[in-house]
Amino acid sequence: MATESESTSKRDSGLGVFSKREIEARLALGVDNPEGLVITPLFNRKKALDADSVDLRLGTYFLLPRSLPEPYFCPDKKTATSLHVKVHVPLGRYLVVPAHHTVLGSTLEFIKLPCDASGEILTKSSIARTFIVVETAPWIHPEYRGCLTLEIANVSNTPVLLYPGRTIGQLILLHVARDHDPAAKIASSYFGPVHPEAPLFKNPEEDLRGIGVPRTSVIRKSWIDDKGQFELDA
Amino acid sequence: MSSSGESLVHEATSLLRLVVSIDRFVSEHEDQFAYTEAAQAFFKDTHKWATEDTGRIADITSKAAKAPDQVESRYLPELITLKGRWKTLHTYIKPAIDAHTLTLPAPLIKMATEHLKQIPALAESSIVALLTPELMYFYNTPKSAFSSSVLVEVPYSQAPGFFTNLTIYHEIGHYVYERLGQVTSAAGKPQASTNLTEAMERAFAEKLRPALPTARNRAWAERVLAAWTREIFCDLFALRNLGPAFSFALIDMLSLIGLMTEETEIAFDEEHPAPAVRFREQLRVLKSDGWWTTVQDLQTEHISLISRLAGQDRDNYFFEFQEKRIPEFTTAFENVVPLIHEAVVAITGHCVNLAQDFAQNRGEIEQCLAHGVVPSRLLVDDNPSWPTPIAMVNAAYCFYLSRLPELMDKLEDQDSSKPADRQKWIQKLESWTMKGIEDYYLLKAEQKARVAITAP
């Protein structure tokens, strides 16, 4: 059995960005190996793997911003799913992203990260030069599995067409000095999505109560009748 | 203008309004969502029929104006025929519009279409799904205008799911049975299909006819025998294509609608043979095709239920009509059953290695699912490979029935004894399976494209 110092030394020697060779070695490990990497489907593997990254393609499902019935959006349990409308754009078709709009998409590839690697998703440079920016929250935790939800912003002054199936981002893997704990439970909230997922929120008062905030101001829709009496909307 | 002339103009206008309204309805909705290729073709045809029939309506009214004596005898009947066609279309259009790719298991429809096209006489067929408010799957008899489309009704509540929707293969079986019955060329019609028809006629003549006193009874009895034959054909067609996943889905569906009770399991009705007979014949195929050895040890009630139903004493089966049991029906039917197997085997040659493929890959696929991973890429003997959709479907169903708690135990705050938690992970499992099937077809298309590019 390795001592703690040996184990630390082994991990330290591997710190940094994964090389192509290491990515390939991890892809060759079985799904039950905690250090294994899964990327599926991986088209044209030779081209998809760069010296230190893997090209990822755009999936076919999107969440678009919806015009809300309320004058505001509150990130809470009830409204989190009302912010988006889901659309499917099959391969061969395109999605128009208007100027200065953001949509949620996902990678076509389903990914499982190793227990000792974090991931970062970056916009492919050719895409970035069309004023499309992928991700403002690009970090992926070790052992994550699922198709990655991408925030895709068109920061240009013209509408841009997105074609599902084309490459859009690059996945970089970085070593993390961490061991797999077989007994540890995995967070279930964002486990294994195959389409872009709407955010999951608790109500603000639930979050704030946890840090000792006793009262939270909320907006509730209400009605006023002809006698001037207020009634909260059910 | 004569009153019959006015009546014709009135009829023509109301029909035109119907045509225009349906055409507009399709135009307004078809671009809002994505549809399967078959549904798109159906909508395209609808536009074409609308244009053609708008012209026909104008033609009929102008001709009728010139020949008022033929309004009653010729032009009104022509309009009524057209109206009948649009009334039928009216029934199908809205459920087809509702069945877009966000409300349907599109990978399942794709897979079923691929399977259907493997049957030589049906290579041009396609499946148009319709969402129905009924909690039941139906097959619609195709009319001549859309005879190459299989119109399958899927309950709207089940539509986004995967497992219970596998029973659409039974409905597709109805289409196959009907179309094979219509094939007249010796090349397109398998001999086994002809043999089946002859066996039905023989069983009816020898076993059943003597027990029936009147000609009216005989015609009805013939229909009952034909309906049972068709139902077993559809079950076996689905089973040959899908493997045990079909039996599991059928059990789940019949349970959902309350038809899997001890009282009903040995009872035939006018449309369906008893569930005990249906599962007895399914078990026979599961054994002969080599599926049973792989799934018989599965720790699930589905396996014990199939075994128990198949083991029912056939003397217990009964068909009751007007509170009277008529055993000659079930005796006659038993003579037909072996020929149904032959007819199904004759058209499902493409299914021959499915069980073997499943047995080889089941462990790896389930391993992926146990780790929450889409099983579209496996490592078999350290080499990457893609499992077939049918291997994925069956492994996923086996996993769902026997190992779901194993997956849930790995996750925070999930309790496999709580239906609310459990249903969430069944849904995930279904989504991974569908993604696996999608990936399979993507990888296959990519491989084909690569071969085409490198070919001299």
Image (spheres, coloured by chain):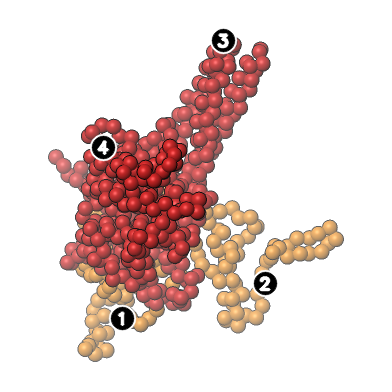
Chain colours: A orange, B red
In the image: residue A25, left or right of residue B140: left
Q: Residue at x 39, y 46 (%)?
A: B211
Q: Chain of mark 4?
A: B
The correct choice, above or below, for B185 with respect to B335 in the image is above
* Quadrant containing the N terminus of chain B in the rendered view: top right
Task: Name the residue beneath numbered marker 4.
Answer: B189
Question: Mark 1 is on which residue type?
Answer: Asp
Task: Name the residue beneath numbered marker 2.
Answer: A217
The correct choice, above or below, for B63 with respect to B242 in the image is above
Q: Between marks 3 and 4, how big is the CA–CA gap?
A: 47 Å
Question: Mark 4 is on which residue type?
Answer: Lys
Q: Position of residue B261 (x, y in %)?
A: 46, 64
Task: Name the residue beneath numbered marker 3.
Answer: B67
Question: Mark 2 is on which residue type?
Answer: Ser
Question: Mark 3 is on which residue type?
Answer: Ala
Task: Name the residue beneath numbered marker 1.
Answer: A179
Q: Chain of mark 3?
A: B
- The answer to whether dots 1 and 2 both sit on one chain is yes
Q: Position of residue A133 (x, y in %)?
A: 42, 56
Q: Residues within 10 Å of mark 3 (few under 14, many from 20)?
A: few
Q: Residues within 10 Å of mark 2 (few under 14, many from 20)?
A: few
Q: Residue at x 35, y 60 (%)?
A: B315
Residue farthest to the right? A227
Q: Chain of mark 1?
A: A
Q: Between marks 3 and 2, how big is the CA–CA gap?
A: 79 Å
